[in-house]
Image (tube, rainbow, N blue to C red):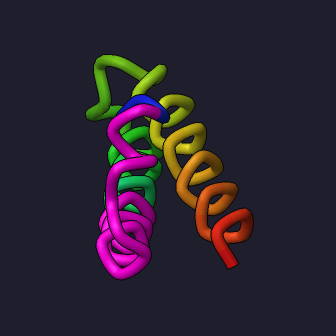
Amino acid sequence: MDIKTLKGKSKESLAHDLTEARKQLSELEFKCAASQLKQVREIRETKKTIARIKTLLTSTT
């Protein structure tokens, strides 16, 4: 997700997206450990998405 789409969302929606991104990150890390993940960069992109969401949540408070 890019920052433009995240800025248009409500605080509750961002919190929901944050929990979903964290679930996805744990699944990706598990797949990577089991050598089932083909594109490892998805982990990096998910971490960046989590950081963007957390930044927006703290800046709107």
Q: Tell me if residue 17 is in the magenta stretch.
A: yes
Picture quarter containing residue 22?
bottom left
Q: Main secondary structure of the magenta part?
A: helix
Residue, x 33% and y 59% (percent of image)?
9
* Image: 39 above or below 48: above
Q: Quadrant of the C terminus?
A: bottom right
**Observer-nearest residue: 44 or 61?**
61
**Observer-nearest residue: 16 or 44?**
16
Q: How many marks?
A: 0
Residue, x 47% and y 20% (percent of image)?
41
Residue, x 30% and y 72% (percent of image)?
13
Residue, x 64% and y 69% (percent of image)?
60
Q: Is residue 49 left or right of residue 6?
A: right
* Image: 10 above or below 50: below
Q: Quadrant of the N terminus?
A: top left
* Image: 3 above or below 31: above
Q: Is residue 58 left or right of residue 34?
A: right
**Observer-nearest residue: 18 or 59?**
59
Write down the region rendered in magenta: 4-22
Q: Tell me if residue 8 is in the magenta stretch.
A: yes
Measuring from the top left, give residue 5's x and y in whole percent: 33, 38
Q: Is residue 26 left or right of residue 47?
A: left
Measuring from the top left, give residue 12's x and y in whole percent: 35, 81
Measuring from the top left, give residue 44's x and y in whole percent: 56, 31
**Observer-nearest residue: 33 or 61?**
61
